[in-house]
Image (cartoon, coloured by chain):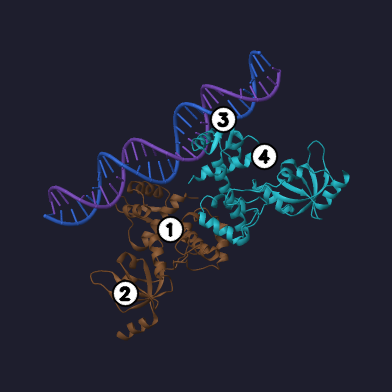
Chain colours: A cyan, B brown, C purple, D blue
Amino acid sequence: MPSASVQNYLKAIYQLQETCETVTTTALAQHLDISAASATNMIKKLARLKLVRHSPYHGVELSTAGEKMALEVIRHHRLIELFLAEALGVPWEAVHAEAEKIEHVISEDLEDRIADFLGDPGRDPHGDPIPTKTGFVERPAYQSLFDLNAGQSAVIRRVSDQNPDHLKHFFKLGLIPDATVDVVQREPFQGPLRVRVGSGSEHTLDETLARSIWVTLSATQKKLFKAKK
Amino acid sequence: MPSASVQNYLKAIYQLQETCETVTTTALAQHLDISAASATNMIKKLARLKLVRHSPYHGVELSTAGEKMALEVIRHHRLIELFLAEALGVPWEAVHAEAEKIEHVISEDLEDRIADFLGDPGRDPHGDPIPTKTGFVERPAYQSLFDLNAGQSAVIRRVSDQNPDHLKHFFKLGLIPDATVDVVQREPFQGPLRVRVGSGSEHTLDETLARSIWVTLSATQKKLFKAKK
DNA sequence: TCGCAAATTTAGTCGCGACTAAATTTTTTA
DNA sequence: TAAAAAATTTAGTCGCGACTAAATTTGCGA
């Protein structure tokens, strides 16, 4: 079994691959908060283990084996997040950090028991899809909240759990999966946007924050969109 | 926070102190399945950290700080064992190995939530007392099953969880906390003993096995004992 | 009490996964 | 398109916690 370090690298590469086509050494190093040299070292090791393909100076890519391993870790992570929230009431913004450690030490058997307990769930508390045991993962076509225009209304489907401070902030603002948001105002030039959460408070989100939230247009919006055509 | 290694050493020293007055390097090394030289190295480190007192060539002893730390790890371990058994139905003989890994990675907050969930329990599934958060631990005056005589009857209170194979064996034989055992026959010269479990099957236990089970004499036995006097 | 065996410690090594500093390659820009 | 900047890799080091082999200390039995 791979070390916790190897697991973390694979997970990071997987997550970066979701947004960027090619994963650079620097991006990986930043994501894991380590030096670029350390990242290079580990990339070479992963390449030796046939878990990634590495074209020196041009980035890294998961192999089939590497992706499978990454998805196993991610499955652990998300099952644990949901389990901690459901079974023990661990607050939404804390489950990520806790799962980050536990994901590396649970057995296959415990993984199965947790999945069973939760009724084989499809989503973790932040809306992230939980990979199946066979390595299949949903990839719903959500759009970023940042890409909405003023006047549009949407339902939050997923919130990035990468930054604990952001997460806490989102929770405080009510920006959680299944919440409704209306874009009240849109500043030009990729500026911040102002949203109303539910039918209550209004808040301003900058680009980073708004890009960490994925939504689907709400039913009425979709109809309007169709009508326009 | 101490590394998982440090935590394991402290736990091991604590457990050895329960039976032996003085903990030797060799005993520690055997308990942790490492070389004696490795044990010496870590002992020196622990001494530097003021977690143990070390008189070279004469053994090692936990300091107050070291004992406190050991008890925290043991509290984690036993809470997790019980939690896995209660919440997820992890079988009796498997909880130990699972807890051995998780105990090092849970937060204070999660510890509290698990204790809460379980209603601040006093015992883990093997009958081991769970230390309180303040570092107090019950030390009931149980006697070893091996010290009983033929004809005596007792209730199992605690079973050592140190050896997974033994544990599995105990479970198969019904030798679990709260079970009743009658000593049917006692071989001389520290030989094996034959016991009836509940009012059912009979089994033979050698010294090592019998010393891994702690009991209290059953009520009727105590009366008989008093009457003799 | 002397000598030997067992226990313990010392000395030196290794793999892992991090680091910094320096060299190299790629990309940008003037 | 050439030079500067940025990204990446190489080279060498470090702490941790394991190891083996060798030296030392202790304690037991003759």
Q: Nearer the viewer, mark 1 or mark 3?
A: 3
Which residue bears the numbered disc 2?
A: B148
**Which chain does the residue under circle 3 lie in?**
A
The reply to the same-chain question for discs 2 and 3 is no
Which residue bears the numbered disc 3?
A: A55
* Residue at figure coordinates x 59%, y 32% from the top left: A59
Tag 1: residue type?
Glu
Residue A204 vs A86, above or below: the answer is above
Quarter-of-image position of residue B65: bottom left
Q: Quick one: SS at disc 1?
A: helix
* Residue at figure coordinates x 65%, y 50% from the top left: A129
Which label was assigned to residue A19?
A: 4
Q: Are marks 1 and 3 in contact (CB under 8 Å)?
A: no
- Front-most of B160 and B44? B160
Residue A87 vs C11, above or below: the answer is below
The reply to the same-chain question for discs 2 and 1 is yes
Lower position in the chain sequence, tag 2 or tag 1? 1
User: Which residue is situated farthest in the right direction here?
Assistant: A228
Mark 2 and mark 3: span between their CA atoms? 70 Å
Mark 1 and mark 3: span between their CA atoms? 52 Å
Quarter-of-image position of residue A17: top right
The reply to the same-chain question for discs 4 and 1 is no
Residue C27 x/y as whole percent: 65, 25
Residue B229 visible to the viewer: no
Residue A210 vs A40, above or below: the answer is below
Tag 3: residue type?
Ser
Q: Quick one: SS at disc 4?
A: helix
Q: Quick one: SS at disc 3?
A: loop
Residue A50 vs B220, above or below: the answer is above
